[in-house]
């Protein structure tokens, strides 16, 4: 069959040598991004910490923002928590939850379309994961985790940070008794999953809901993850001078690593804008090296459970959703003339649809 073209988001940079910006460099080529991710001389920006139970405390305690000397032990906490979770069971639980929510939404027989972001993508993965991490009220945890995620990265407004402080306290209250570092890193797993998993589900609905049934959901997600990653970039700070992609990078330079560009690097992916499942598989969206996401299999399983149900019961509700997976190769995207655009939450590094409707078959 002919696979469609899925163009990059309008502000995705092209692959090339590192580009200088105000306080550092933008890194776009696959090999360069991978080299920085796996170089211990390039560290995550520091999080200073704060009083116990606050957002600042959470950020200063989770492995995501930990300095090199604290990272391995804190990462091990998350890895141990995830080791007890079976991805296949997560997928089945997510599918059951998604099906039940769709049944409720259409119980009177009148609803023919739903917003998949509000009903499923932002709810099901967090509720399923919170239950298996032992939180006392998984449904209440969803709203709390969402509030924390909104302020997790620097730059949030004071009112958003205040809501996140209250949400961290609520999550601690409903978490199983544990040492502070253990509790923080369990909550961190939920926060890391919130926007990223929702964004992946949204992208898969938008680009692949009309894909042929013969295309497995796992393969569909893998290619969507490459072409429309929910996490578009991450940052590192160079601790020493070093070359990156033919440029000499000075100490303390901030490196913005663009996954969305690196995933389309023609040196790795021939015809990089073509949706072609089963390609080289060199996708950097979950990171790489010692700080690669420890929950990749679990996040994909949760997303797959929701997608399994949607693929069986729904189809795209707007022409912006690239239904061309079932037909000839075309270019489809928010800038396509005549198509309804999909809006996204404002964020410098995440790409999560604000809303995305589907219709029942």
Image: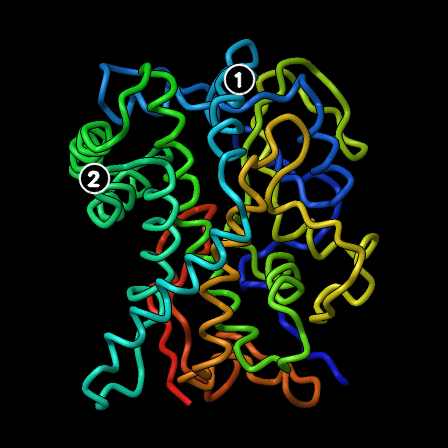
Whether 221 is drawn above or below 19: the answer is below
Where the C terminus falls, by quadrant?
Answer: bottom left
Whether 23 is drawn above or below 233: the answer is above
Q: Nearer the viewer, residue 215 or 30?
A: 215
Q: Is residue 145 left or right of residue 294?
A: left
Where the N terminus falls, by quadrant?
Answer: bottom right
Q: Nearer the viewer, residue 8 or 197?
A: 197
- x and y, in percent, of residue 150 in the image: 30, 43
Residue visible at 37% across and 50% down?
A: 128
Residue 332 numbered tag: none
Residue visible at 66% across and 90% down?
A: 327
Count of numbered circles in the view: 2
**Which residue is denoted by mark 2 in the rendering?**
160
Q: Nearer the viewer, residue 326 or 56?
A: 326
Q: Is residue 68 left or right of residue 341?
A: right
Instruction: Name the image quarter holding residue 37.
Output: top right
- x and y, in percent, of residue 108 in the image: 18, 86
Q: Is residue 354 left or right of residue 282?
A: left
**Which residue is denoted by mark 1 in the rendering?**
71
């Amino acid at each position: 069959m002919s696979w469609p073209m899925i163009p990059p988001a309008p502000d995705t940079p092209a692959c090339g040598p590192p580009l200088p910006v105000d306080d550092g460099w933008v890194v776009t080529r696959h090999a360069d991004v991978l080299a920085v991710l796996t170089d211990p001389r390039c560290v995550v920006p520091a999080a200073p910490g704060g009083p116990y139970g606050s957002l600042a405390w959470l950020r200063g305690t989770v492995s995501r923002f930990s300095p090199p000397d604290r990272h391995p032990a804190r990462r091990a906490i998350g890895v141990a928590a995830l080791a007890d979770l079976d991805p296949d069971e997560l997928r089945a639980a997510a599918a059951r939850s998604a099906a039940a929510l769709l049944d409720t939404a259409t119980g009177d027989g009148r609803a023919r379309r739903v917003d998949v972001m509000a009903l499923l993508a932002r709810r099901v993965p967090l509720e399923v994961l919170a239950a298996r991490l032992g939180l006392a009220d998984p449904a209440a945890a969803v709203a709390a985790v969402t509030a924390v995620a909104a302020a997790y990265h620097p730059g949030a407004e004071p009112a958003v940070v205040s809501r996140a402080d209250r949400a961290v306290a609520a999550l601690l209250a409903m978490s199983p008794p544990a040492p502070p570092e253990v509790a923080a890193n369990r909550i961190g797993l939920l926060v890391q999953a919130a926007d990223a998993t929702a964004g992946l589900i949204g992208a898969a609905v938008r680009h692949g809901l009309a894909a042929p049934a013969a295309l497995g959901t796992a393969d569909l997600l893998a290619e969507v993850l490459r072409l429309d990653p929910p996490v578009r970039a991450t940052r590192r700070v160079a601790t020493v001078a070093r070359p990156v992609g033919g440029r000499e990078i000075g100490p303390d330079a901030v490196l913005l690593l663009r996954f969305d560009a690196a995933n389309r690097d023609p040196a790795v992916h021939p015809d990089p804008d073509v949706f072609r499942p089963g390609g080289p598989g060199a996708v950097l969206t979950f990171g790489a090296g010692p700080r690669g996401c420890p929950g990749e299999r679990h996040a994909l399983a949760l997303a797959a459970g929701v997608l399994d149900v949607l693929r069986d019961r729904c189809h795209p509700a707007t022409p912006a959703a690239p239904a061309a997976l079932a037909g000839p190769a075309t270019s489809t995207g928010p800038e396509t003339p005549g198509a309804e655009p999909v809006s996204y939450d404002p964020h410098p590094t995440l790409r999560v649809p604000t809303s995305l409707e589907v219709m029942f078959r």
